[in-house]
Image (cartoon, coloured by chain):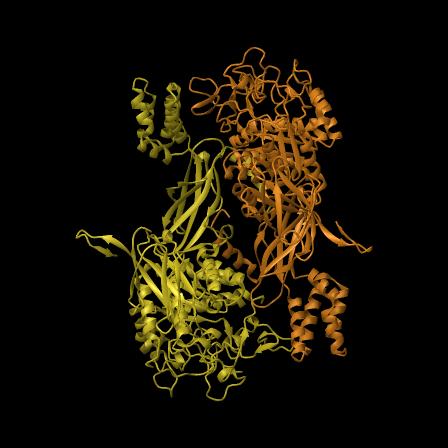
Chain colours: A orange, B yellow
Amino acid sequence: MKTDAPAAQRAATALGGGRLRAVIEGIAPQVDCGRYPIKRALGEQVRVEADVFTDGHDSVAAQLLFRRAEETSWHAVFMAPQGNDRWAASFTANALGTWHYCVRAWVDHFETWRRDLVKRRQAGQDLTSEFQRGAALVQAAAQRAQSRQLAQWAQTLADEAATMEARCRAAADESLHALMRAHPDPELVSQHPNVLAVTVDPLRARFSSWYEFFPRSATPDPHRHGTLRDCEARLPYVAAMGFDVLYLPPIHPIGRAHRKGANNRIEAEPGEPGSPWAIGAAEGGHKAVHPQLGTLEDLRRLLDSARALDIDVALDMAFQCSPDHPYVAQHPEWFQKRPDGSIQYAENPPKTYQDIYPFHFESPEWRALWRELKSVVEFWIAQGVRVFRVDNPHTKPFPFWEWLIGEVKTGHPEVIFLSEAFTRPKVMHRLAKLGFTQSYTYFAWRNTKQELIEYFTELAQGDAREFFRPNLWPNTPDILTEYLQFTGRAGFMLRATLAATLGASWGIYGPAFELMESTAREPGSEEYLDSEKYQQRHWDLDRPDSLKAYLTLLNRLRRDNAALQSDWSLRFHGVDNEALLCYSKCSEDRANCILCVANLDVHHAQSGWLDLDLEALGLDARQPFQAHDLLSGARFLWQGSRSFVVLDPAQGPAHVLLLRRRVRREQDFDYFL
Amino acid sequence: MKTDAPAAQRAATALGGGRLRAVIEGIAPQVDCGRYPIKRALGEQVRVEADVFTDGHDSVAAQLLFRRAEETSWHAVFMAPQGNDRWAASFTANALGTWHYCVRAWVDHFETWRRDLVKRRQAGQDLTSEFQRGAALVQAAAQRAQSRQLAQWAQTLADEAATMEARCRAAADESLHALMRAHPDPELVSQHPNVLAVTVDPLRARFSSWYEFFPRSATPDPHRHGTLRDCEARLPYVAAMGFDVLYLPPIHPIGRAHRKGANNRIEAEPGEPGSPWAIGAAEGGHKAVHPQLGTLEDLRRLLDSARALDIDVALDMAFQCSPDHPYVAQHPEWFQKRPDGSIQYAENPPKTYQDIYPFHFESPEWRALWRELKSVVEFWIAQGVRVFRVDNPHTKPFPFWEWLIGEVKTGHPEVIFLSEAFTRPKVMHRLAKLGFTQSYTYFAWRNTKQELIEYFTELAQGDAREFFRPNLWPNTPDILTEYLQFTGRAGFMLRATLAATLGASWGIYGPAFELMESTAREPGSEEYLDSEKYQQRHWDLDRPDSLKAYLTLLNRLRRDNAALQSDWSLRFHGVDNEALLCYSKCSEDRANCILCVANLDVHHAQSGWLDLDLEALGLDARQPFQAHDLLSGARFLWQGSRSFVVLDPAQGPAHVLLLRRRVRREQDFDYFL
C-alpha cells in the first residue's frame, strides 16, 4: 500500500479480478492491519471472524486458511455464518512459533441452486431445466476435480427417467454438498490479500508466577556475598511458595568507575558492591558472570536445578554499560561522544547518571551493535536460559527490538521476553506489538475500585489484549508504592491477592514482599531504604510474620483453578459498597468459575450486596449454588444474583470463591460440584 | 502485505531502517487500513491524527503530508501534540477529486537540546559543552540546507565570547527553531508506508434536497402521456419548494415483452405503459430516450432550465434489460443462458421477473460488458447529467462499481452517485466504501425514539461516517411505509421534519408525498395502490391540503441554517418523555445551533422536560438564551439545561429551535443573536 490504494485496486480489478464476486472484509483478530502478529499460548484456539458476502442473493462459502510459517501450503477449514454476514472458524495453535492465517471465499453456485430448488419445489414449479442446471454445475466440478464420484452425481441429477423424489434426494445429499464445496472454480475464489500472523508462545507466556530476588543477598551468612550456589540452595524456598519463574537482576561484573554507594550515594565507599545494572568491568561484560557470584558453570547448575523444580530462571537484559565495560574501549563507535571527546553518560536533564553509558543506536555502526547485542541473548540461550526480563526497553529504538526478538524467536520460539516498560501507554503497547511476550503494567499504582475496574476492563477486554500480556507486580526493587508503605500487612495481602487473581501472570520482588519491607528511602520516594540495588541485605526467611504461607496458598489456588490461568474472561460484578470489588474469571468451558470479592479498605470491615451477572457465570437463577472460599475454607449457600458479604481486613483481604453448581446424584441427594 | 508482514518488516529494518527511531501509528481517519478513501465535501477540513513518539526522552516532530492526486510533491504542515502521544493537523480540501495524505516524523534532536538546555540552566549546570553540541547540530543542518542563516546561528551558539544570556536567547529563538524543523536529517525521517486517500466531492454530496417524480405523470392533461417538456414546466414547482436535485425514474424506451400491467399485473393490457425499469425496446436501450417522453434535445433543455434554478437533474441508472433491449440480440454473451437456450430472466426463487433480464457479470465477456456500461454513464454525462441514482447496486458485483465510479470520477469528480441499496448493513457500507457518494438508509423504517437514537448515533458518530453519507427518504415509489399508511397528515409532517433535520440530505417521492398518498396495494404491502411504476397518475398539485408549503418551510430552514447542512454534529439530548425526541446540530464554529424537539406521538399532545447538554450547544448555564421556533415563530426564553416543552400534533410535529445567545449591546440592553 505504498501508493494510491484505490487506483491500484481499480487497475488490478480491470486486469482480471472483475468476476471475483465474493467479498472478504473486517478479518479479526488483527493488529494494526496485520502489521503485527497476534499472540496465543500453545494449544489455544485461534478464532477468526470475517465479513463475507456477495452481491445479489447467491450463497457464499468461506474458508479460514492457516499454516505454520515453515509449511508451504495452507490447511483450510470452512467458516460458519454467525449472522449479519459475519463468518467464523477456529484452528488450534498446537505448535510454538509463527503461524499464518487468511480467509478466502467464493460464490457457491451449487449451494444457491440447492437452496433455491427447495423453494421452487415448494412453489410447485417445473424443475426439469433446474435439474439440468444442477447437473451442469456438478459436471463442471467433476471435470475440474477429475472426480468419477461427482460425474456419477451429475448423471443422477440429469437422469430424466428417475423419480422427482430421487433426484431431489440427490440434490440434497450432504456428501455431494461436501464434494462440491471442496472443488470450487479456482478462477472465482477471492482470497484476502492480507496474510495475518500469530505468535504461539509457551503456556508460561500466559500463566506464570514470578519471584525476584538479589543473588547478592541470597546467602544465609550475612558476612559474605551471596553466590549462584546460594541461589540454588534457595530454589526450594521459591518452589514451595509455588512460583515458577525466578528472576535474577543482572549477574554480570559490576563497573567500578562512578560506582554508586548505598542508598544511591554518588560515590561508593570501598567494598560497596554497586548496582548490578552498571554492567561491565575488567572481568567482562554482558557475557560474563560477576566473579563474586560464581561461574558460568554455577549458573548452568542453577538452571538445571531450577528446571527439576519446573522453575524457569529469568535473566535481566539491561543493554547499557558501565564506563569500565570492555565495549567502551573495544567499540567506542557504539557510544555517543561529547564535544570534549569523552563518552556521553546517561542523562534525563537535569539528572545525570555518570555510572551508565547508554548505547548510541543512531551510530553509523548500528548494525554491528545490533549483531553484538543479539549475540548476548544467544550466549545466554546457549547456557540454557529461556526467559529474559528486559530492562527499560523503551529507551532503545523500537526497530531494534522487533528485529532482535523476531530473530531470536525464529530459532527459539520457546523464549519469553518480559518488557520492563513503565512508560506511556502507547510506548508500552508498541513494545508488546513488536514482540515482547509479557509486559509490566500500571497495576502497582491502581488502587481504587474505579481505577481497578477501568484498567482491568481495558486489559482484559480491550483490543490490545491480542498482543499485550500483562504481568502484575505489587512491588519491584524500584517500586515500593506509597500504598505498601502505609497499609501494613493487610495492604500487602490485599495487593498480592489482587495481583494473583486479576492477573494470570504476576510477580513479586522478595523477600522484601513476604517480609513486608515498607520503609522508603525518604518521604515521597518509591525507592526502598537500604535498597538491594546498592547493597547486600540479609533477610530472615523464617520470620513468623512472613507472608510466605499466604503466597503459597495464592499460588496453589492459581494452579488448581484453570479460571485463574488466563485473563480474557475477567468480568466485574456490581456491589453496593465502594470499598468492595467483585470480579469473576471462568475457564473457557466454564467448568471452573472463580468469584473474587476484595475489601479495598484495609482499615475497616466492609459489607455489601453483590449483584452478580449469573449468565456470565453460567449459573441458573432458579438453582442454589455453593460459593466455597478457597482462602478461608468457608462455604456459602447462595441463590440468584444478590448475595450478602462481609469482609474484615483482620481476617483476610478477600473471598476467593469457587462456585460449585448443584448436581443431583443418583442417590437422590444434592451435591455441589 | 501479501506475505509475512512481520518477517518482511524485520528484513527491511535490517537493510537500513534501524536508525529510524520515530514511530507513527494509528493514523485516523482511514477506512479499512487505507483500502478505501475517506470522503469530504469541497472546502471541508481534513483533520488527521496519529500517534507519534520515539524511544527514550527525545522530542519528536511530525508532519502531515498532503497533495492532490495530480500533484507530484507533497505539501507539509507540522502536526501539534494533543496529549498521550497523539498528534494532529488539518488541511483544506479545496479542490474536487482525489487527494492523498500521509504522516512523517523524526526525532527532533535540536528541540530536545533546546528543551534540555533550559532544564540544565535552571539546575545551574555548566553549559559550555552543551552550546558546542547545539552549535554542531545547527552546523550540520546548515550544511544539509546550504543555509548561510543557519551557519550564522551555529556561530552565535558556539561563540564563547558571547554572554550566556545571549547564547541562551539564541538557543530559544523561534526563527532558529523553525529553520531547524524545516531541515531534519532526511536519513532519519520515518514516513508511514500507507498513503491514504480522500475523495473530495461537490458540496451537494453532503447537503442536498431531492425530489422524485415520474415524467409520465408530469402532464397537466390527464389524457396524454407526460413528457420531458412537461417536466421542464414543473421545475418552478420543485424549485419553489426548495429542492435542489430532481430525480427522474428511467427515461428510456420500455420493453414490450412480458410488460407489466397496472398494480404489477403479470401482463399489461394494450396501451398500458409498463415499468420504466424494464429498459430497452426496438427504439433503443440505455442511451435512448423513451419516444413518448420526447427527445435527447428535450432532456438537454430540461437540464439547462434546471441548472438555471440551481437544480441538478438526477437520472436513474438501472443496469438491467427488458427482453426487447437491443443488447439481448447484439450481445447474448452478456446474459446467462438457461439449459433450454433461452435467456435467464430475473428471479428470487420462487419469484420470477420475466420482464427483466439481468446482466451476467460472471460472463467471460465481462470486460466488454463493463466497458459498455461505463459508456452509458459517459453518454449521459456528455448530455450534461451530473447526478445518478443507481438502482439496486447490490445486485451487481462490487468490483464493477469500484471500477466504474473510480473511472468516471477520475474525469468528472463533480459527479454524484446515490446508491439505492436497501439491503444488509455490510453490503450498504461496502458500496459506500467503494465509491458511492450517497446512500439510501433504513430511515423509512426507524420510527420509535430508541430506534432513531440508535440509528442516527451510528450514522453521525460511527466509523462509517468517513465514507457513508446518508440520504433520508420518508417514501419512495417502492416504499409506502406502514407508518405513513396509518398516521395521516401528522405522520407525513413528522417524517418530513425528521428527515429534513436529522439528515443533511433528504428526499421525497412526490407528488405522492405532499399529497399524502397513503393507500397500499393490499394489507401488509409497502407498494402504492395504482403505483406510478406501472401506470400514469394525475396529481392535483394545488390541492388545499397539500404539504407543499410545509416542505417549502423545511427546505428554507435548511438553507438558512448551516447547522442543518451537515450530519456529524448531531447530538441527542435527554427528555423525560418517551414520545419526545430531542436533538441538536451545530455548525462547525457553533455560531449556528439548531435544537429540534419532535413529538413522535401523532395522536396526542405530549409534554416533558428537556435535559440539554449545554456544553455541546456552546451555551453558558449562567446566561439565558432564546429558543426561537423557526416553524411556528414562537420564541422561548430559557436558561440552564432543563426546559419544559409541549407539542400538540394538531399544531405541528416539532419545534425546530434556533438557539440565540444573548449579547450585550453598547446601548446596554440585551439582544439575542
Q: Nearer the viewer, residue B569 or A278?
A: B569
x, y (%) of residue B73?
39, 45
Q: Is residue A74 something that shows in the picture? A: no
Q: Residue furthest top?
A: A270
- For the point 69% across and 74% down, the residue is A131
Q: Residue furthest left?
A: B667
Q: Nearer the viewer, residue B167 or A658?
A: A658
x, y (%) of residue B513?
40, 75
Q: Is residue B619 left or right of residue A427?
A: left
Q: Residue furthest right?
A: A667
Q: Is residue B499 left or right of residue A461?
A: left
**Relative to A251, residue A12 above or below:** below
Quarter of the view holding residue A99: top right
Q: Nearer the viewer, residue B416 or A439?
A: A439
Q: Is residue A385 something that shows in the picture? A: yes
Count of numbered labels shown in the rendering: 0
x, y (%) of residue A501?
63, 40
x, y (%) of residue A228?
69, 21
Q: Is residue B9 left or right of residue B289?
A: right
